[in-house]
Amino acid sequence: MTSPISCVTLIYPQSIAEQALILIQALQQLIVEAKLPLSIEAVASEQKLTQKIRKQLSQQYQQPLLVIDDKQQLTLLTNGVSVSPEWNSLQRRVVSAGRKSELLLQATKLTASSRVLDATAGFGHDSLILASSGAQLTLLERNPLMVLLLKYEQQMMAKQPNWQKLMARLHIVCAESTEYMQPAPTACDLQAQTISHAFDVIYLDPMFPESSYAHSSKGAKVGKHMQALHQIAEPPSLKEEQALLSLALSFVAPGGRVVVKRPIQAPVFASQAANESWQNDVVRFDAYFTYL
């Protein structure tokens, strides 16, 4: 079933019109290549796109917008909050990532030959940490606008020599995770057979109510990336959690694991106890094992 095409408004300052139009053409090419159900309506702004102006634009349009600023950076503007994947800001963390410093890598136990499905990619930050191990990553994201941001970020980062190998290990797919992990309808469905059980680890970082991200002793607040995601996605219900975990456990390779990221105060995912957990003061990674 073909998804209806959504029109997204892209705002750019008139002062960089020539550069912005080149960038817009690149975005349109990505939309075509990824078969995203999106179209872009470009609007030039005579004003400098300050935070005040962005808040006014959010109130005016009442829907998520794309913005190109005077530095030609592409951002998502939703409810007055401007965000982009900002993968370059993670460079130091990615370079130094290892099991001693990253709970995520302790929980996933990846090697350079591992195949990982990040079934809830979001802005892709955890995907970069996973890929730092040398593993091959498939990133699933159901929101076409988020997929466009991810693909554009990947394209831009791949131009930097020190990021090229890691970017080549990322495969970004626009898909609902529960649909992607559905079992093959027939034994002769070779494509589905090839995908199924191709992953040693399935990683889930599902949305959770905003109150769950605050830590009473630390006073931590929800970051801007999480705020933006809360504007365009809803946390799963218990029934949806149970369906997702069940599918993931049946989809992962025998002997593999499903790893779920949770706020430290959150209950276990899908009301199912984990086989093993790793945690710090803020976050917890629960692992569910499958056996040969």
Image: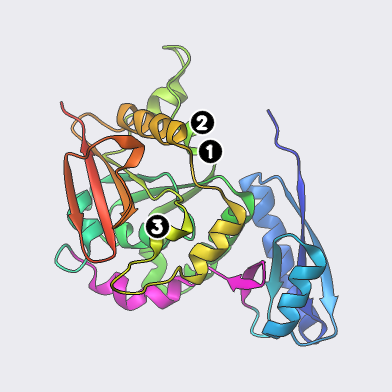
Q: Nearer the viewer, residue 65 or 93?
A: 65
Question: Which residue is under mark 3?
Answer: 212
Amino acid under label 1?
Glu
Horizontal arrangement in the rendering, residue 142 relative to residue 46 (left or right): left
Q: CA distance from mark 3 to mark 2?
A: 27 Å
- Please, is residue 187 above or below residue 218 in the view? above
Does the stretch in magenta take in 188?
no
Amino acid under label 2?
Glu
Question: Which residue is under mark 2?
Answer: 179
Residue 270 percent location from the top left of the image: 35, 36
- Please, is residue 85 above or below residue 114 in the view? below
Question: Which residue is under mark 1?
Answer: 176
Horizontal arrangement in the rendering, residue 56 relative to residue 235 (left or right): right
Horizontal arrangement in the rendering, residue 197 relative to residue 225 (left or right): left
Q: Select label 3 or label 2 by which is in front.
A: 3
- The answer to which of marks 3 and 2 sits earlier in the sequence is 2
Q: Which residues are magenta?
A: 73-98
Residue 6 percent location from the top left of the image: 75, 48
Does the stretch in magenta take in 97?
yes
> Do callouts 2 and 1 mark residues in contact (Cβ within 8 Å)?
yes
> Do callouts 1 and 3 mark residues in contact (Cβ within 8 Å)?
no
* Classed neighbour count for the residue bearing mark 1: other residues with Cα under 10 Å, few (<14), some (14–19), many (≥20): some
Q: CA distance from mark 1 to mark 3?
A: 24 Å
